[in-house]
Image: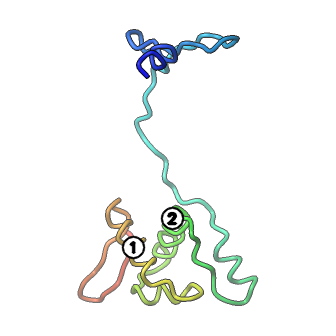
Amino acid sequence: MDRILHRVFDIENINFIPFPGEARREAPDAIQQEVDIEPKETAAKPEAAASGGKAVFSKSIPKQLRVLRETLTERSHTTDSLAEIFKRKPRKSVEEGLQSLILVGVAEFEAETQTWHTV
């Protein structure tokens, strides 16, 4: 295993060793310092309006968090009012998503009113 790593990476110089027929390339000097997490346009609301019913709560966690964040930017919600926006009222998944938004500093829960809102 060690021999394989030494063959793929020049560990002392931290440069990539090319495979046969590939040009040698240097390790990048720049390190990513920031991440752009601006909300993207979501198709969940137009889909719900077009179908005349409720939106489907995506199985993809990033999409779930994006929809929850965008919904909270419009107004404050309770957990139940957020779950009612979607088919089959996915209360548990909505609550888990809201807890994730708290952890990354995007949302807050107000205990007095039992509502969620963006920071």
The spot of residue 71 in percent (x, y) is: 51, 76
Give the residue at mark 2.
61
The spot of residue 83 in percent (x, y) is: 49, 85
The relative height of residue 40 versus residue 80 in the rendered view (above or below) is above
Q: Residue at x 40, y 36 (%)?
A: 33
* Image position of 63 (left or right of 52): left
Tell me where residue 43 sits by quadrant.
bottom right
- State the SS at label 1: helix
- State the SS at label 2: helix
- Label 1–label 2 contact, CB within 8 A: no
Q: Which is nearer the eye, 13 or 65?
A: 13
Q: Residue at x 48, y 67 (%)?
A: 65
Q: Which is nearer the eye, 111 or 16?
A: 16
* Snapshot colouring: rainbow
Give the amino acid type for the residue marked by disc 2 in the picture.
Ile
Q: Residue at x 71, y 77 (%)?
A: 47
Give the residue at mark 1.
96
